Image (tube, rainbow, N blue to C red):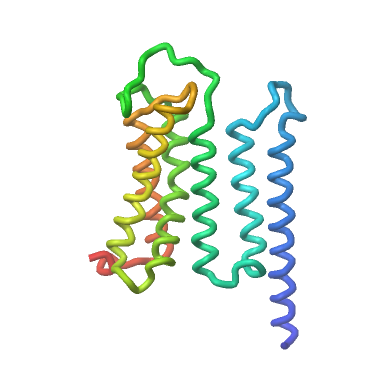
């Protein structure tokens, strides 16, 4: 192994170590967030998001060691983010609803909810597309992979809305949530196609 090759390996190992330490720090800070501000103890939205992000950063740092098979890594990363979506989406709310909410009702949508619903499903769409192409590489054309990833994103959103409506205290079901989640999924899929330079002919 020449000197340049050894230098590249050392830099990559250093990068992996920094990623693992950064991920652990993010998770630790998320768990200890209550120590830095006054409020009721417990794991809130910001802490859950931090734990999910920290876990993904740790996985990135340990990928070469634990997951030499790239396909297994992509599927696992998708599973971690999917788990985070369900944890955050099914978190009970202390707010009491002052109106009757129907399943997939046309409730109002705040700007914050709009941003959260779209942004939260962009990575899901991207990772779903990554996992689908890894799992079914060579079996179907990219068009079918796109359809499967989007349908999966819609299925996740519908599942969340049903669970929120029937079982999660303080949460309600909204058609706007489903639409914005679907929009986020589609944006994530398009981002995957753009990054991987999929041509228009590939999806026909």
119, above or below 93, in the image: below
- In which quadrant of the rendered view does residue 179 lie? top left
Q: Is residue 152 left or right of residue 8?
A: left
Q: Is residue 142 left or right of residue 41?
A: left
Identity of the residue drawn at 60% across and 46% down? 52
Identity of the residue drawn at 69% across and 64% down? 16
Q: Nearer the viewer, residue 2 or 104?
A: 104
Identity of the residue drawn at 32% across and 56% down? 148
Q: Position of residue 194 (x, y in %)?
A: 39, 60
Q: Is residue 160 left or right of residue 40?
A: left
Residue located farthest toward the left when viewing the structure as drawn: 204
Residue located farthest toward the top when viewing the structure as drawn: 98
Q: Number of marks in the image?
A: 0
Q: Nearer the viewer, residue 8 or 136?
A: 136
Q: Position of residue 162 (x, y in %)?
A: 38, 33
- In which quadrant of the rendered view does residue 102 lie? top left
52, above or below 109, in the image: below
Q: Is residue 73 left or right of residue 158?
A: right
Residue located farthest toward the bottom when viewing the structure as drawn: 1
Q: Quadrant of the C terminus?
A: bottom left
Residue located farthest toward the right when viewing the structure as drawn: 35
Q: Quadrant of the N terminus?
A: bottom right
Q: Position of residue 143 (x, y in %)?
A: 28, 62
Identity of the residue drawn at 53% across and 36% down? 88
Q: Nearer the viewer, residue 127 or 82?
A: 82
Q: Nearer the viewer, residue 90 or 13?
A: 90
Q: Position of residue 82 (x, y in %)?
A: 49, 48
């Amino acid at each position: 192994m020449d000197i340049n090759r050894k230098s590249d390996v050392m830099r990559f190992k250093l990068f992996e170590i920094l990623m693992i330490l950064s991920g652990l720090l993010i998770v630790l800070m998320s768990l200890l967030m209550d120590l830095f501000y006054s409020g009721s103890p417990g794991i809130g939205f910001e802490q859950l998001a931090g734990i999910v992000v920290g876990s993904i950063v740790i996985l990135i740092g340990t990928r070469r060691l634990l997951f030499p098979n790239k396909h297994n890594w992509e599927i696992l990363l998708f599973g971690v983010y999917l788990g985070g979506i369900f944890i955050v989406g099914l978190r009970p709310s202390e707010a009491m609803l002052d109106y009757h909410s129907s399943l997939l009702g046309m409730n109002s949508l705040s700007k914050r909810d709009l941003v959260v619903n779209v942004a939260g499903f962009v990575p899901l769409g991207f990772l779903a597309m990554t996992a689908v192409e890894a799992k079914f590489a060579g079996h179907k054309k990219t068009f079918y992979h796109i359809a499967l990833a989007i349908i999966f994103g819609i299925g996740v959103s519908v599942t969340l809305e049903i669970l929120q409506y029937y079982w999660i205290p303080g949460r309600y079901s909204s058609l706007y949530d489903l639409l914005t989640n679907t929009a986020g999924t589609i944006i994530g899929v398009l981002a995957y196609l753009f990054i991987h330079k999929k041509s228009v002919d590939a999806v026909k």
